[in-house]
Image (cartoon, rainbow, N blue to C red):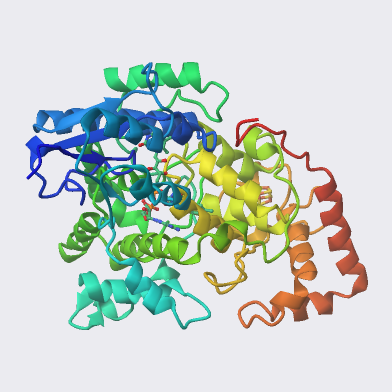
Amino acid sequence: MSDAPVLVPILGDQLTRDLASIRGRTKDDTVILMMEVWDEATYVKHHKQKIVLIFSAMRHFAEELRDAGWTVDYVKLDAKNNAGSFTGEVARAVEEYGPRAIHVVEPGEWRLREDFDQWADKFPCEVQILPDDRFISTQAEFDTWADDRKELRMEYFYRDMRRKTGLLMDGDKPEGGEWNYDSENRKPPKEGLSAPERPKFEPDAVTQEVIKLVEERFSDHFGSLEKFRWPVTRDEAEEAADAFFAERIECFGPYQDAMVAGEDDLFHSMLSTSINIGLLDPLELCQRAEKAYRDGKAPINSVEGFIRQIIGWREYVRRFYWNQMPHLQQANMLNAQRGLPEFYWTGETDMACLADSIRSTRENAHAHHIQRLMVLGNFALLAGLNPRDVQDWYLVVYADAYEWVELPNVAAMILYADGGKLASKPYAASGNYINKMSNYCSGCKYSPAKKTGEGACPFNPLYWHFMDRHRDRLEKNGRIGRIFSTWDRMGEEKQQDYLQSAEAFLETLVPASDGWARMD
Ligand code: FAD
Ligand code: DLZ
Ligand code: SF4
């Protein structure tokens, strides 16, 4: 065997001790390369907390690997010789170590895969790009499953994942008799609903150094750093998971779709930032959830709901992304052309539900699922915001955002830009839905009960404006087509009232200035 080592680049969302590229490797012939690079920190102008999270978690992980005896070449962003990109840094390391091979786990994003695919031609050594086996499904499995289906519904894929993992199975039947308890995940919040506070992790010296770096180098990026309290190590992430299983999972299911002003976490696990960078193993979390059910500590609707989000939605969007790229990025089936309104960045809007969701986004780099879907996403859909702007926004603002998970949720789930491959109907709702599922409306300048004109909740006329302008496409949809008979029964005058109210509201939207999402 040659003395030359194997070079193992580990990316910022691959912070897992038994990653496929190091599993089974010997320490004395391996050089691990970790890189803080300008290209990754700025390909969109990520929320400041996301950059802090990743750099701090990377630095801690490098220390953990060194303590375990690995050789780690760690390149800090402000290192003088920083090459600025993964490919540049790998070129520098190839020059320095003369490796006999490069072993890297596939990146989560298409743009990087295109770069990594060039490495075999660029570098004078063998290059192995390994599957990321931290996911439960495989791409081949999904692609075969998807091959002759016109519509790709998560539910059927999810059932296969249940069978594959054995989670919540009773022989070959679903535990409790149903595959899906979604209908028991929709309890409106009762007066004064609040959840136990999740553990918050005070920034240690490593995180503080990164905060300083980010404040200096990324001062024009969106978001505040004041409330940075995310787990940055495996131990912290496990503490966060322990608290979820001890204190919040019981109510997770019933209140999964509830929203309460100022209650930013409610009963959500708040674990996505840790799962997505590899600090927590998704399958282990699901097994813990199942145990809580079997031990009688959490009801089936909570546990099945949690497991569905992970081995259902999370797995599904990962595979959907790779199955549908690169065209998913350009998809715009509803021909939505309106630019993103400035208030998505400033939070300055009289619509209380949007203002609170954006405030949480700015302060925490997080908003929970139903805020992302039924407030921010619903508005983007109804107002006809163009998918590229909306995609950029979601990729920038959330600490858990990576294109493989953000893009299917934005393009396919909220904007229906893929024409219904992923979702059976657009998630469109009027003010009634938000009023039922939250306490936002009582503190809003608008009224959900008022349908048109001055003081009417803008979601009401926007809803009908959306339906009317997409009638040709949506009327044929069995799940939504029936609402057009309600529209027709309203009569011309009422319809015009709705359409004019919506137009008047849309006129008031101020488009976002350039420079928020991408470098000028
Ligand atoms: P919980 O409510 O506790 O759910 C448990 C876990 O399930 C999450 O940690 C997450 O890993 C997984 N999960 C739940 N829903 C989804 C989903 N729709 N897709 C994939 N995984 C899911 N999640 C991201 O991780 N990154 C994103 O960039 C992202 N963008 C989104 C954009 C839109 C428009 C929407 C509607 C959803 C998006 N989600 C994204 C999914 C979801 O909103 C977040 O995963 C969730 O809010 C994270 O908070 P939590 O850990 O408390 O989740
Ligand atoms: C998101 C991100 C950022 C902001 N910075 C880095 C970085 O400097 N170095 C790194 O290894 N990874 C970073 N990441 C995560 C990568 O962009 C991530 O690996 C891809 O998005 C693939 O999912
Ligand atoms: Fe949102 Fe409309 Fe309720 Fe205001 S009235 S909080 S805009 S749903």
Closest to the observer, 395 or 112:
112
Location of the C terminus (image quadrant)? top right
Where is residue 426? Give x, y as percent: 62, 67
Total marks shown come to: 0
Residue closest to the eye, 266 or 387: 387
| Residue at figure coordinates x 26%, y 77% from the top left | 176
Which of the 4 image quarters holds residue 323? Answer: bottom left
Left or right: residue 2 versus residue 422 is left
Task: Point out residue 15 in the picture as x, y percentages from the top left corner.
Answer: 26, 41
Q: Nearer the viewer, residue 497 or 449?
A: 497
Quarter of the N terminus within the rendering: top left
Q: Could you tell whether 279 is left or right of 414 in the image?
A: left
> In the picture shown, does residue 300 fall above or below 235?
below
The picture places residue 333, in percent across and down from the top left corner, at 67, 66
Q: State the residue in front, 254 or 103.
A: 103
Residue 509 makes an appearance in the image: yes
Q: Determine if residue 232 is in view.
A: no
**Residue most extreme to the right:** 493
Question: Relative to residue 33, is residue 188 depicted above or below?
Answer: below
In the image, residue 342 lies at what x, y percent?
A: 70, 37
Residue at screen point 42% across, 69% down: 182
